[in-house]
Amino acid sequence: MTEPIRVLLVEDNAGDADLIRETLETGEFHLEIAVAVDGVQAISYLLRKPPYTHVELPDIVMLDLNLPKMSGQEVLAQIKLHSSLRAIPIVVLTSSDAEQDIGKSYELGANCYVTKPVGLAAFQSIIKAVENFWLTVVKLP
C-alpha cells in the first residue's frame, strides 16, 4: 500500500466539510483527511501544539477564508512565517469571490484560489477538479 496523502481541511461549516470529505474519499487516492474547524485549531495542528503533538504535517491544506477565531488569511500569513510550513501547498477554497480576498490571498502565499460554487453537483465537480489537479498533475513536496 502506498503512503497516504495527508490533507488538512480548514472549514468551519460542518456541511461543507462533510461534503468535501465525502467527495475526496470517493476518489482513487488514499487520503488521510484531518479537519480543523477554526483558524486557531488549524495553526495548533500545523505547529503540532497539544493535542496535536504527534500528527504528521499535511501534504496539502484546503483553507476556507471565513473562519472563527482567526481568519483564513491570518492562518495563511502564520503558515508562511514558519519555514517548516512554507512549502505546504495551500488551496484557498472559499465562498468569497471578492477581488480583494483573491489578491490578498495570493500576496500571502496561497498556491491557488477556488470559489465554492452553489449547488451540489457543481460543488462536487470543483472538489474533484482540485483533487485531480493537486494530486495527479502537481508534484507535492
Image (cartoon, rainbow, N blue to C red):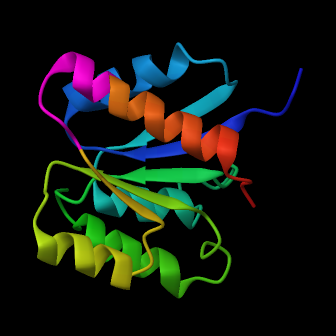
What is the quadrant of residue 104 in the picture? Answer: bottom left
Position of residue 45 relative to residue 129, above or below, is: below
Q: In this view, does 39 lie to the left or right of 112?
A: left
Was residue 119 drawn as part of the magenta stretch in this picture? yes
Q: The magenta stretch spans which residues?
A: 116-124
Q: Is residue 126 magenta?
A: no
Residue 47 in the image, given as x and y percentages of width and height: 56, 67
111 lies above or below 133: below
Q: Is residue 118 visible?
A: yes
Q: Where is residue 4 in the image (x, y as percent from the top left)?
A: 74, 32
Q: How many marks?
A: 0
- Is 32 left or right of 8, judged from the image as shown? right
Q: Is residue 49 visible?
A: no
Instruction: Identify which residue, 47 or 13, lies in the foreground.
Output: 13
Horizontal and vertical percent for residue 52?
57, 51
Percent position of residue 124, x then y: 33, 23
Q: Which residue lies furthest to the right in this view?
A: 1
Residue at 46% x, 40% y is 130
Q: Residue at x 75, y 61 (%)?
A: 141
Give residue 30's quadrant in the image.
top right
Front residue of 109/132: it is 132
Residue drawn at (53%, 36%) of the image: 131
* Extreme-top residue of the structure: 26
Compared across the picture, whether 120 is left or right of 138 comes to left
Q: Quadrant of the N terminus?
A: top right
- From this view, report whether residue 20 is shown above or below residue 38: above
Q: Nearer the viewer, residue 129 or 21?
A: 129
Q: Residue at x 28, y 64 (%)?
A: 72
